[in-house]
Image (spheres, rainbow, N blue to C red):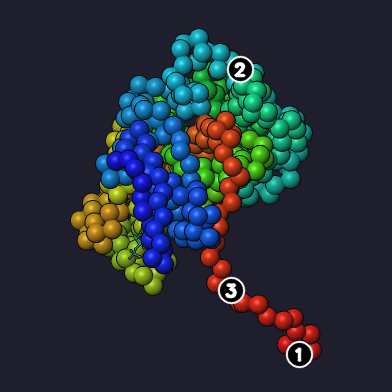
Amino acid sequence: MSGTATLEIDGKKYEFPITVGTENEVAIEISSLRNVTNGVTTLDPGYKNTGSCESAITFLDGEQGILRYRGYAIEELAEKADFLEVAYLLIFGELPTREQLQKFHRDIKEQSIVAEDMKKILDGFPQAAHPMGVLSSLTSALIAFNPSSVNVDSEEEMYKAIVKIMGKFPVLTAWTYRKRAGLPLDYGDDSLGYVENFLKMMFKKPHSEFKRNEIVSNAMDKLLILHADHEQNCSTSTVRMVGSSHAGLFASLSAGISALWGPLHGGANQAVIEMLEAIKADGGDTKKYMAKAKDKDDPFRLMGFGHRVYKNFDPRAKIIKTAADDVLASLGIDDPILDIAKGLEKEALEDSYFVDRKLYPNVDFYSGIIYRSLGIPVEMFTPMFALGRLPGWIAQWREMRLRKEPIGRPRQIYIGETLRSFKDIDHR
Ligand code: SDX
């Protein structure tokens, strides 16, 4: 499809160019709309029908349940790549050669030391503070220890900032957990792989050697790949919006972490387990929760179900569901909430409320069951999502800056009071 779209307003016709992407997605390019129509804008709460940018990073087709990073199918990457390879692919656009990957990992290791004074900031938080709030604050605090903002016109400076946050973020994530668990902070071991080193920083006991477990590190690596990017979701759009004002990379990432925290977004993985545990405590009464989810007067939603874009199975949920069976079997874990989750999925997919609204399990529905089997506590599930999404946020921020996108500033339709005169306080 090419050519133009015609809009008629008050009997006057306006033409706007049609943009077609490499996967034949079609958009009406309306950047001249307000000027040519003397002030008319569009209105689209939640941007359900509005593209914010052109991007070459991730393609997803919600109707077909397709997800690709830089053209590679998520199913292939989850099976054949490792997380650092996928991070490199997302950020720089191509799968790395062996030498490029080794250099990337070496440079990241160089940066995986966090300034000792950051521990004083961490100590300032109450032990019960939610890890997402701590992580967002620590990421923002990194700016104070790395004040120079990124000169995006310098590939070298951009690369340095990228390996810096890729090196420090796993440390901050693990420290956030250990602070909450009352454990001494651990700096890891740079002889280990990226994901295995993160697991060591998380779980090494102060009085014993770290026990490597290939099943656990492979499962974690796969989960991080599956969370690595997802085009213009809420938190990525936040990272782009903040970065569009030319705020620094770390400040933009800190904002993205806060957006991801919400239970409608990345916080859903924690909410799913809490929901499944509640159902288990209720004697496995899934019907009660299905009824609550369908009751318009009840704010309860079936957490881990539904998606703004996927109106078919979330391909990541399919992969994670299979991995959950494999990981729990390999670890010899029989977790009754996995059966509850499968039962809930079956019931929902046979229920017209969910079928009519095309509500399927999303990435968050099964991920928590694996995280739990790996020994990760539920309040750390969303930080795991953030750790996976980090390269996607970086890639999207970098693309936005390199394409010199304008500052994000949506319009509105004002529905408030029209002009009125000030009233003296004694006459209100
Ligand atoms: C993520 O965008 C991304 O890519 C996000 C993400 C990523 O990788 O970055 O994929 C990660 O955030 C996954 C989503 C995790 N959130 C949840 O699991 C929370 C539960 N899901 C919902 O809150 C909801 O489905 C959203 C927020 C995910 C999507 O909401 P939309 O697109 O705004 O859809 P909607 O609220 O307009 O719902 C349409 C209808 C409504 O019913 P009607 O008014 O038409 O009668 O479906 C209903 C909703 O009430 N509905 C649900 C439901 N989700 C939608 N009803 C019950 N349970 C649900 N989970």
Query: Dividing the picture into quarters, in which one does residue 354 lie?
Result: bottom left
Please tell me whether mark 1 sits on a helix, a strand or a loop.
helix
Which residue ends up furthest to the top in the rendered image?
99
Q: Is mark 2 within 8 Å of ligand 1?
A: no
Between discs 3 and 2, the one toward the N terminus: 2
Instruction: Give me the residue at 39% from left, 69% from top.
Output: 298
Mark 3 and mark 2: span between their CA atoms?
54 Å
Between discs 1 and 3, the one toward the N terminus: 3
The residue carrying mark 3 is 416
Residue 225 visible? The answer is yes
Mark 1 and mark 2: span between their CA atoms?
68 Å
Instruction: Give me the residue at 44% from left, 20% from top.
Output: 94
Please tell me whether mark 2 sits on a helix, a strand or a loop.
helix
What amino acid is at disc 2?
Asp
Q: Measured from the top left, where is residue 425 in percent x and y?
A: 78, 85
Q: Measured from the top left, where is residue 14 in percent x and y?
A: 41, 55
Classify 103 as above or below 402: above
What amino acid is at disc 1?
His
Q: Nearer the viewer, residue 60 or 11?
A: 11
Residue 332 visible? The answer is no
Q: Measured from the top left, where is residue 189 in percent x and y?
A: 59, 19
Query: Dividing the picture into quarters, in which one does residue 286 lie?
Result: bottom left
The residue carrying mark 1 is 427
Quadrant of the picture in which ligand 1 is shown: bottom left
The mark found on residue 107 in the picture is: 2
Of labels 1 and 2, the one closer to you:
1
Classify 421 as above or below 300: below
Position of 421 with respect to 350 (left or right) is right
What amino acid is at disc 3?
Gly
Of labels 3 and 2, the one closer to you:
3
